[in-house]
Amino acid sequence: MNNHEIFTHDGKEFELRVTQIDEKYCVRIFLVDTLVSPTYSVDFETHADYFEQHQENLIDNLKSIAKSDIEQGMYFKA
């Protein structure tokens, strides 16, 4: 799993980070080290159960949702 990804939208460089917080995988997006997204998360147990049943990684889904929100202009602006 890639825990760090840089992508560009509207000429701005965003950083997507995947971390573990309080027994959850969390996806957050930063712009110049400022958090500009909500925290998208899934707990460890749900992630494991879903993967076991569907062979799909929910973290990848959270990353896609987070990036899509940025591309639609839905992020905290300073």
Image (cartoon, rainbow, N blue to C red):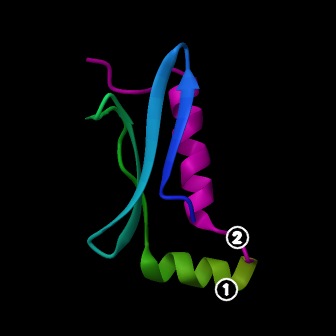
Q: As displayed, is residue 74 above or below residue 62? A: above
Q: Where is residue 26, by image quadrant?
A: bottom left
Circle number at residue 56: 2
Q: How far apart are marks 1 and 2 (CA)?
A: 8 Å
Q: Which residue is drawn at 57% across and 65% down?
A: 1
Q: Where is residue 41, by image quadrant?
A: bottom left
Q: Where is residue 48 in the image (x, y as percent from the top left)?
A: 55, 82
Q: As displayed, is residue 9 above or below residue 14? A: above
Q: Residue at x 61, y 46 (%)?
A: 64
Q: Position of residue 57 (x, y in %)?
A: 64, 68
Residue 68 is inside the magenta segment: yes
Horizontal side, residue 16 vs residue 9: left or right: left
According to the picture, the residue beneath numbered tag 1 turns out to be 52
Q: Which residue is drawn at 47% across and 25% down?
A: 13
Horizontal side, residue 44 vs residue 51: left or right: left
Q: Quadrant of the C terminus?
A: top left
Q: Residue at x 32, y 76 (%)?
A: 23
Horizontal side, residue 77 vs residue 57: left or right: left
Q: As displayed, is residue 75 above or below residue 50? A: above
Seen from the viewer's position, the closer of residues 12 and 35 is 12
User: Which stretch is magenta?
Assistant: 55-78
Q: How crowded is mark 2: few (under 14 residues within 10 Å), some or many (20 or more)?
A: few
Circle number at residue 24: none
Q: How crowded is mark 1: few (under 14 residues within 10 Å), some or many (20 or more)?
A: few
Count of picture labels: 2
Tell me the amino acid under the disc marked 2: Glu
Q: Where is residue 2 in the image (x, y as percent from the top left)?
A: 55, 59
Q: What element carries label 1?
A: helix
The answer to whether mark 1 and mark 2 are in CB contact below 8 A is no
